[in-house]
Image (cartoon, grey):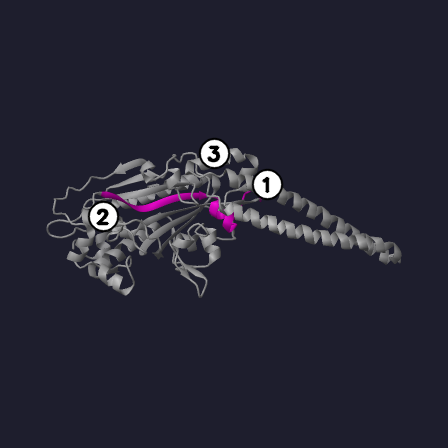
Amino acid sequence: MIDIQLIRENSQEVIRRYRTRNFDAAGIVGRVTEVDSGRRNTQKQLDDTLSEAKKISAEVGELFRAGKAAEAEPLKDRSSQLKKRARDLQEKLDTLSSELNELMTQLPMLPHPSVPSGSTEEDNEIVSEEGSMPGLGEDALPHWELAKKYDLIDFEAGTRVTGAGFPVYKGKGARLQRALIGFFLDEAGKAGYTEYQPPLMVNADSAFGTGQLPDKDGQMYYVGADDLYLIPTSEVPVTNIFRGRILKEDELPVKCAAYSVCFRREAGSYGKDVRGLNRLHQFDKVEIVQVAHPDKSYEALDEMVSYVSSLLRKLQVPFRVARLCGGDLGFASAITYDMEVYSAAQKRWLEVSSVSNFETYQSQRMKLRYRSSGGKNLLAHTLNGSALALPRLLAALLENNQTGDGIVIPEVLRPYTGFDAI
């Protein structure tokens, strides 16, 4: 959630910044201001009532000890009245606090000032583009046909076993998946990220903490019998490792990397957008997460974007970096950069990574803080990025590296695959 202090100090500026997201926040912000004012006023009344009750209780005790029980009776009556008033005020405070929390969860993260206005991905800003487009002949095959030709992925078996969006990798296709995962984890270790192996299911508190609930409730697989959610990304369990923690300032930044299987119910669009590996319900991904000092989180963001770019560079795949416009921004993100690789046979760009700074949105929900050098407990900033998601990257690697004799494996992956070509 955003910091309510921002709304208290300048509600009109908050409303204006939300317009970058094409989000009309005037109604919610107005109600937040009203409920917050009532809540703070009620809190003051409750504090004053409890203070008076405490004072009277002390006076009653002194009178009884002095043998003046009769003089204590009126004070006892007043004490009873104050206790009832305190109960009523506490009930009102709980109601107002609950409403305020509900209103605040409806507000997405405020976009960073550098986020461009826009409604859809067509309005995203291309920041950079690298690499040479492969020159494939007219007979170039899309990855789903290459996968069938070289017996790498069995889409039909996955549909038969589970359903659409659950492919079966086999032979050199499975080995290539494992090679990519190993390469990404090793590179993350070299870059100073500590490797984690997190659970594949989380509870509702964890999903709320990173912003999946309530915003993406319908996009996650839910295990009703155990009240758990299959993770859409390892960002969720890894970031929640630090939920409720107070870190030391000199521990920041905390840098984590994790491989996991990811599960998403989202159906997405149709046609070419979901053919083959373009959109799956189950896929593999290596994620990087940072918990950073607020003054240095944008340095961390730049470093993460640079790091993910270096992976794509080493894989020798054409890619571009896009800064998402407000309308394409995730609910919890202040700013997001997408990394897209070029799929030569499909002749289109495919997103393989999103790198985001959530500022205090997640840490506010998770009560993730650090103790400053001045002794204050302050909210940290959280960031995450795909480094990388495998399906679309694998699609581009298969398509871009196809030749008349097979598919050439990028040089950096050969120590992991054990073969140079398919």
- Residue at coordinates 28% horizontally, 43% vertically from top-left? 340
Residue carrying label 1: 34
The reply to whether residue 253 is in sight is: no
x, y percent for residue 145: 17, 54
Pick whichever, 331 or 379, lies toward us: 331
x, y percent for residue 18: 46, 37
Which of discs 2 and 3 lies nearer the camera? The answer is 3
Q: Amino acid at mark 2?
A: Ala
Magenta stretch encompasses residue 311: no
Judging from the image, what secondary structure is the residue with disc 1 in?
A: helix
How far apart, in angstroms, are the residues tagged by discs 2 and 3? 40 Å
Q: Earlier in the sequence, mark 1 or mark 3?
A: 3
The residue segment tinted magenta is 348-375
Residue carrying label 3: 16
Query: Do the residues bearing badges 2 and 3 touch, measured as CB atoms within 8 Å?
Result: no
Q: Earlier in the sequence, mark 2 or mark 1?
A: 1
Residue carrying label 2: 396
Q: Quadrant of the C terminus?
A: bottom left
Q: Earlier in the sequence, mark 2 or mark 3?
A: 3
